[in-house]
Image (tube, helix red, strand yellow):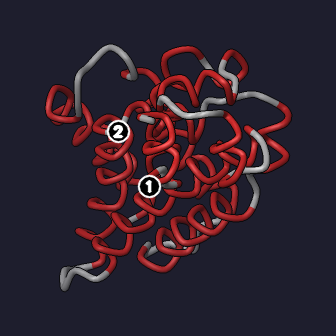
C-alpha cells in the first residue's frame, strides 16, 4: 500500500532530486534506474513513466541546473550598475555558483559518459552563449572568441581546483576576488 501511494505522488522533481544524490555519490555510470526507484521506494516502472531512460533523466537534471546558473547570470545582468561591476559580478557569480552548488557543478561539467554527452547540447550552449555575449558586450576591448573561452576555462579551473576541498564559496572568497580582478585586467 505504501509503495502505491508513493507512485501516485511521484513527481519529476522528486526523481531528479533522488537521481542527483545518487549520481554524485556513485557516478552516473554506476547508477541504475532501479537504484533510483529503490531510493524513492517506488517501482522502476514509475520512473519510466516520467523518463524514457537514464540519459533523459540526467539531461533533465542538468537542464534544471543550467536554469539555476542562467537565473544567476540574469540577476546580475539586470542590476543597475556599471559594466565593470557587472563583469566582476558575472565572473564571481560563476565561481560562487560552482562552489556553493558543488554537486550540481560536477554533474553539469565533469560527467564524462558518452551517452550523456550526446544528450547535452542545447541548454548548456544557450547559457554559455549568454555568458560569452555578456562578457563580449560589457568589455571595453573587442574580445575574440578564444579570449572568452580562455576566461571561461580559467573560471572553470578555479572552481574545479577547489571542488571537494571547501564547503562553499565563502572559504575562498578572497582568492576568488583576486582571481577575478586578475582576469578583469585583460578585459576591462
Q: Residue at x 38, y 68 (%)?
A: 71
Going from N to C along the chain, the mark reached first, 1 or 2, is: 2
Q: From the viewer's perspective, is residue 157 above or below residue 5?
A: above
Tell me the element at label 2.
loop
Q: Would you name the residue on which mark 1 appears?
A: 186
Q: Residue at x 40, y 59 (%)?
A: 68
Q: Residue at x 78, y 42 (%)?
A: 53
Tell me the element at label 1.
helix
Question: Where does residue 41 sit, x and y in percent of width and height?
Answer: 48, 29
How would you rate the neighbour count of disc 1 (Cα within 10 Å): few for under 14, some for 14-19, many for 20 or more? few
| Nearer-the-camera pick, 92 or 2 | 2
Question: Where does residue 40 sit, x and y in percent of width and height?
Answer: 47, 32
Residue 99 found in image quarter:
top left
Q: Quadrant of the N terminus?
A: top left
Residue 23 found in image quarter:
top right
Tell me the distance, in whole angstroms, between the alpha carbons under discs 1 and 2.
28 Å
Q: Would you name the residue on which mark 2 appears?
A: 101
| Nearer-the-camera pick, 184 or 8 | 8
Amino acid at each position: 500500500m505504501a509503495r502505491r501511494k508513493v507512485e501516485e505522488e511521484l513527481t519529476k522533481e522528486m526523481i531528479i532530486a533522488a537521481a542527483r544524490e545518487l549520481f554524485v555519490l556513485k557516478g552516473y555510470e554506476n547508477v541504475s534506474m532501479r537504484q533510483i526507484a529503490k531510493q524513492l521506494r517506488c517501482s522502476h516502472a514509475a520512473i519510466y513513466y516520467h523518463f524514457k531512460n537514464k540519459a533523459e533523466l540526467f539531461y533533465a537534471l542538468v537542464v534544471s541546473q543550467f536554469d539555476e546558473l542562467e537565473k544567476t547570470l540574469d540577476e546580475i545582468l539586470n542590476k543597475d550598475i556599471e559594466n565593470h561591476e557587472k563583469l566582476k559580478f558575472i565572473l564571481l557569480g560563476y565561481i560562487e555558483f560552482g562552489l556553493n552548488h558543488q554537486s550540481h557543478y560536477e554533474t553539469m561539467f565533469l560527467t564524462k559518459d558518452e551517452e550523456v554527452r550526446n544528450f547535452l547540447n542545447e541548454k548548456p550552449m544557450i547559457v554559455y552563449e549568454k555568458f560569452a555575449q555578456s562578457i563580449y558586450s560589457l568589455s571595453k576591448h573587442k574580445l575574440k572568441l578564444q579570449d572568452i573561452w580562455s576566461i571561461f576555462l580559467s573560471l572553470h579551473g578555479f572552481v574545479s581546483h577547489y571542488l571537494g576541498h571547501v564547503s562553499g564559496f565563502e572559504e575562498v572568497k578572497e582568492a576568488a576576488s583576486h582571481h577575478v580582478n586578475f582576469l578583469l585586467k585583460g578585459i576591462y
